[in-house]
Image (spheres, rainbow, N blue to C red):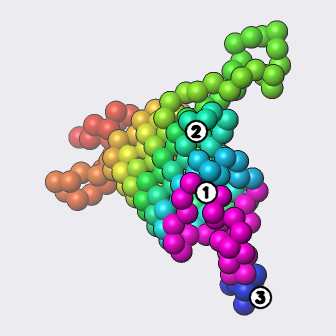
Amino acid sequence: MHPLIRLKNLLYVYYFRLFYSGFFKSFGKKSRILFPDIIEGAEKISIGSKTTILNNSFLAAYPSKNSELIIGSDCRIGRNNHIYAYDKIEIQDKVLTASNVYISDNTHSYKDYHKAILDQPISYSSKTIIKEGAWIGNNACIFGCVVGKNSVIGANSFVNKDIPDYCIAVGSPAKIIKKLNFNTQEWEKTDDHGNFLP
């Protein structure tokens, strides 16, 4: 990184922590958010320690009074990530996301066909949890589900069903293609349900 860019980032981090980190529900030591796009409901957002959220993030815990967004410690959230909690989203420790990742627990209603979707209320789907150590690839969409511990979600995947711990899932909708076999200590091919293939 060019020294001037590094200096700019360091100055911004200092400025952010000095003036804005106090608006969050909690904001851990050595965490930083670099040049966010939008932050809504900061008072309902908790961020652990030593977490980095890169440029142009959209973080929201809104509009419900019970909305909650939790991002753990030692996470690295990529550029242009959009994380929007209507009820609750939990991103546990040491989660890595690539660029342009969308994580949500809600969608727009579309039941009333007499109204534009823009004019219809937000509809809650289900609690979204990204468990410890997971890796979410570029352009992935995580919607109302649980991604298991140390699991991998491939680039451009759409995930709306739970993915167990230690699995690799890809596609739209995402399907499990590999799982860690603890007996062999290898990632081995599986069927869509996570059963090892012969």
Q: Magenta segment: does it hold 13?
A: yes
- Secondary structure at numbered mark 1: loop
Magenta region includes residue 64? no
The CA span between labels 1 and 2 is: 13 Å
Give the residue at x 65% y 29%.
107
Residue bearing the label numbered 1: 24
Q: Is residue 99 visible to us here? A: no
Q: Residue tagged by mark 3? A: 4
Q: Is residue 110 above or below residue 131?
A: above
In the image, residue 173 lies at what x, y percent?
53, 33
Specify the segment rendered in magenta. Answer: 9-37
- Rendering coords of residue 195 (x, y %): 28, 37
1 vs 3, front mark: 1
Q: Amino acid at mark 1?
A: Phe
As displayed, is residue 142 above or below residue 54? above
Label 2 or label 3, whichever lies nearer to me, is 2
Q: Earlier in the sequence, mark 2 or mark 3?
A: 3
- Amino acid found under the numbered disc labelled 3: Leu
Q: Secondary structure at mark 3?
A: helix
Q: Earlier in the sequence, mark 1 or mark 3?
A: 3
Q: Which mark is residue 67?
A: 2
